[in-house]
């Protein structure tokens, strides 16, 4: 599916016309000096890629990147346009993944390519529907709006991660369970994935600010710098959450170790208390006709001493809060 949004200006640069057009009309408008067009392509099959290659003569490597679904965020400079790959987060069934948006940015056209419907693209389309102008800076400002929406999409994901971290910390402090260990490892896996996604995106926006590409209007750089600041902030937040997740794992392991030590301590105390009683039953329970100290008085004295020592140990352990 191909959608196109066109803008035309007069000789003074004022917007003369803005509307949604067909793909063929958009291509025709590119032949006019005042035409600026955004093409959004949901590339579901090979004819969509063939249309991109035949219409714009994009480099074959960029078309191959659009076909694949495991490209990292990057930026490449070609003759007359730059090729950019961004990632937007997707949370489904408790797992975090990402969608790729491939972008061809030129002074006259702005092409977005994705294999499935994308929420960020739809939000940008709604914004353009309410304010159908592609702004006075044309495609550069439109790319800024898309990049800003793509980066801001990580806000709710990081908020959800923060809630998971807080919940795990509270649960571990109160009582430890096996499910908490699974939750910690899932959290660490999601944080590693987000870090691997945002790291290259940080490089993309940094390159846009440093290299000053010819197709990017300089007036849009201050806005792109704001997007870059957001990416850096999110990247730092992810590092903080990774440290918290590692601390939660250490706390979990320490808590499990402390619980085990407490159990072993109580079992040792119980064993110590019953040792005198075990001695008495073992000594006087031997199967012999005559035993040493075979006297009722000695027997009861020994029993009293053993029971007294067991009671004394019990009082001592309770006094020291070991039981």
Image: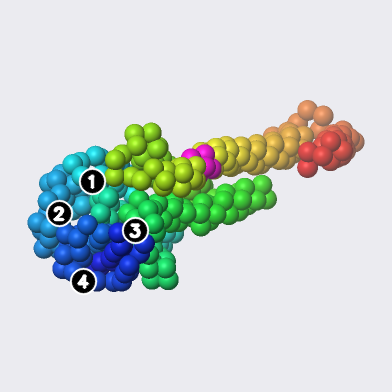
In the displayed structure, would residue 272 be above or below residue 226?
Answer: above
Hey, which quadrant is residue 273 in on the image?
top right
Front disc: 3 or 2: 3
In this picture, residue 204 sits left or right of residue 243: left
Q: Residue furthest front?
A: 12
In the displayed structure, would residue 142 be above or below residue 207?
Answer: below
Q: Label 2 neighbourhood size at 10 Å, few (<14), some (14-19), many (20+)?
A: few
Q: Is label 4 in a helix, a strand or a loop?
A: loop
Q: Earlier in the sequence, mark 3 or mark 1?
A: 3
Q: Which residues are magenta?
A: 232-237
Q: Earlier in the sequence, mark 3 or mark 2?
A: 3
x and y, in percent, of residue 109 in the image? 25, 55
Q: Is label 1 in a helix, a strand or a loop?
A: strand
The residue lying at 78 percent from left, 28 percent from top is: 292
Label 2 to label 4: alpha-carbon separation:
16 Å
Residue 1 visible to the viewer: no
Q: Is label 2 in a helix, a strand or a loop?
A: helix
Q: Earlier in the sequence, mark 4 or mark 1?
A: 4
Q: Are marks 1 and 2 in contact (CB under 8 Å)?
A: yes
Q: Nearer the viewer, residue 222 or 237?
A: 222
**Numbered circle sitting on residue 81:** 1
Label 3 to label 1: alpha-carbon separation:
25 Å
**Numbered circle sitting on residue 22:** 4
The residue lying at 73 percent from left, 37 percent from top is: 269
Label 3 to label 4: alpha-carbon separation:
26 Å
């Amino acid at each position: 599916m191909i959608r196109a949004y066109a803008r035309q200006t007069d000789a003074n640069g004022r917007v003369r016309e803005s509307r949604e057009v067909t793909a063929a009309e958009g291509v025709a408008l590119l032949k006019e000096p005042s035409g600026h067009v955004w093409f959004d392509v949901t590339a579901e099959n090979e004819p969509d890629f063939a249309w991109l290659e035949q219409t714009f003569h994009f480099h074959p490597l960029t078309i191959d990147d659009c076909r694949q679904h495991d490209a990292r965020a990057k930026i490449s400079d070609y003759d007359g346009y730059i090729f950019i790959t961004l990632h937007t987060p997707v949370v489904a069934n408790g797992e975090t993944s990402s969608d790729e948006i491939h972008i061809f940015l030129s002074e006259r056209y702005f092409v977005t390519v994705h294999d499935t419907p994308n929420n960020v693209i739809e939000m940008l389309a709604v914004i353009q529907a309410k304010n159908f102008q592609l702004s006075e800076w044309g495609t550069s400002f439109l790319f800024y709006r898309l990049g800003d929406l793509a980066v801001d999409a990580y806000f709710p994901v990081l908020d959800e991660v923060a809630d998971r971290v807080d919940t795990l910390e509270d649960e571990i402090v109160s009582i430890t369970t096996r499910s908490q260990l699974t939750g910690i490892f899932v959290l660490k896996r999601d944080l590693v994935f987000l870090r691997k996604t945002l790291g290259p995106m940080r490089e993309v926006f940094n390159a846009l600010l440093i290299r000053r590409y010819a197709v990017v209007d300089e007036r849009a750089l201050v806005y792109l710098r704001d997007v870059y600041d957001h990416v850096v902030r999110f990247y730092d937040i992810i590092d903080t959450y990774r440290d918290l997740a590692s601390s939660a794992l250490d706390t979990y392991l320490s808590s499990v170790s402390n619980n085990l030590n407490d159990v072993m301590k109580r079992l040792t105390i119980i064993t110590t208390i019953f040792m005198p009683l075990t001695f008495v039953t073992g000594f006087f329970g031997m199967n012999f006709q005559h035993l040493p100290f075979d006297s009722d008085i000695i027997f009861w004295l020994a029993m009293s001493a053993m029971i007294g020592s067991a009671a004394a140990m019990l009082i001592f352990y309770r006094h020291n809060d070991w039981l």
